[in-house]
Amino acid sequence: MFSPLLAMRLWVLDSRIWASKEPTPQVWPLVSIYKPVSYTSRPFFPSFFFHNAQWLRCNLKSFPQDSLSFPPPPSTAFKEVEHLTLKNATNTYLQLSKSRLTTLVVLTAMSGVALSPYPTTLPVLLSTAFGTALCSASANTLNQLQEIPFDAQMMRTRTRPLVRRVISPLHAASFAALTGAVGPTILWFMVNPTTALLGAGNIFLYAGIYTWMKRRSIMNTWVGSIVGALPPLMGWAACDPHALSSFSIQDVLPPLALCMLLFSWQFPHFNSLSHLVRGSYAQAGYHMLSVTEPSRNALVSLRHALWLIPVCSILVPVSGLTTWIFAITTLIPNLICVRSAWLFSKRGGESEARQLFRHSLWYLPVILGLMMVHKEGVEWLQWVGIWKV
């Protein structure tokens, strides 16, 4: 693969060649060097954000070698590669695990435990948290192993350990295999087989299907949202492993409501973020809705922001997770996010996307906190001893 810098140089050089010729309206300006691509074929990424494989079609023999040579960069442009030691190994493993994302996954799994009406024990609680964290660490590491050359092209990912060669791919693969084996094993023997299967399935969904689809279909976002919606189900299954196999609406509806909440929340959260970094996604060749159809990307965010209102105001109280007061108290945060998503859909600017992304950061913890406050059957004033029956 050629670097983007070389690609831009070739583009400039080709533009000079075509400057003295009649422009051909039905052909891209790069036809003298590359395989002709007509406008009707509609290349997936315009400008120099084409898929990297296009540079393989380049006929470099037609150019003098001196026109393609670049002066060597100064030594100050290089930095010595860090050596993996006991001191920085923990930080490297945390980066491979995407520690902030893993923390969010564990917290959402714990929300399923906390909101479940079924009793649990401290060993089960800790085993669920630890096993879920290991499953997330394995999935994230496997994801980075497959995207090393693409992460190197994106500003926000090019400092990852595998890109900087702080850790070898074999070492990272061993870490992913270890965490991927220990995590489900802990969940199987310390919690229950249902939770273990959900954890192993989430590793496959994220590291397998989702990562594979990122460079092939915009539907990868929907698959990723399913991955994010499963941790609360794991927490619920830790307390009630028979809920998923039950045909009773009373047993199935509460975990389903939690999954719907997490599933829909991810679209305003991720779509706004992907809009802000859409240039990097395009340069790395990722098929994201923010790259191919920015207006539709914003519209999907608005659609799911609107869907969160009936989820919080109808589905959650009907399922028995909370009282009906929850339906009223969540209207304010929901309306704030809907307004922000509507502005993003209407204007489609980066300031609107940034505002929606910031709202999504506080939205989820606020909603989950309100669910705990209004949990059905819990009298908090009585529990803390302020009010007695």
Image: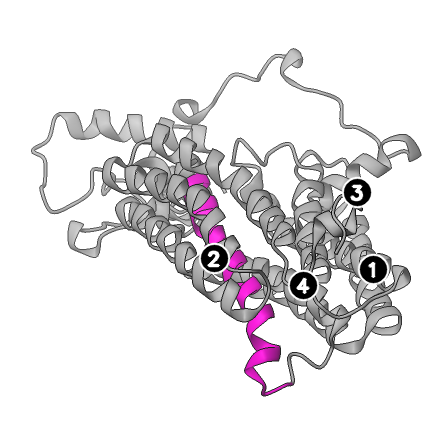
Mark 3 surroundings: few (<14), some (14-19) or many (≥20) residues within 10 A: some
Residue beneath disc 4: 377
Q: Is residue 248 magenta?
A: yes
Magenta range is: 246-273
Whichever of labels 1 and 2 marks the residue nearer the N terminus, that label is 1
Q: Nearer the viewer, residue 21 or 381?
A: 381
Q: Relative to residue 384, is residue 42 drawn left or right? A: left
Say which residue appears at 63% left-offset and 85% top-offset.
246
Residue beneath disc 3: 93
Type of the residue with mark 1: Leu
Q: Position of residue 32 (x, y in %)?
A: 23, 40
Whichever of labels 3 and 1 marks the residue nearer the N terminus, that label is 3
Residue beneath disc 1: 125
Type of the residue with mark 4: Gly
- Residue 259 visible: yes
Give residue 376's quadrant in the image: bottom right
Of labels 2 and 3, the one closer to you = 2
Whichever of labels 2 and 3 marks the residue nearer the N terminus, that label is 3
Say which residue appears at 88% left-offset and 73% top-offset.
189
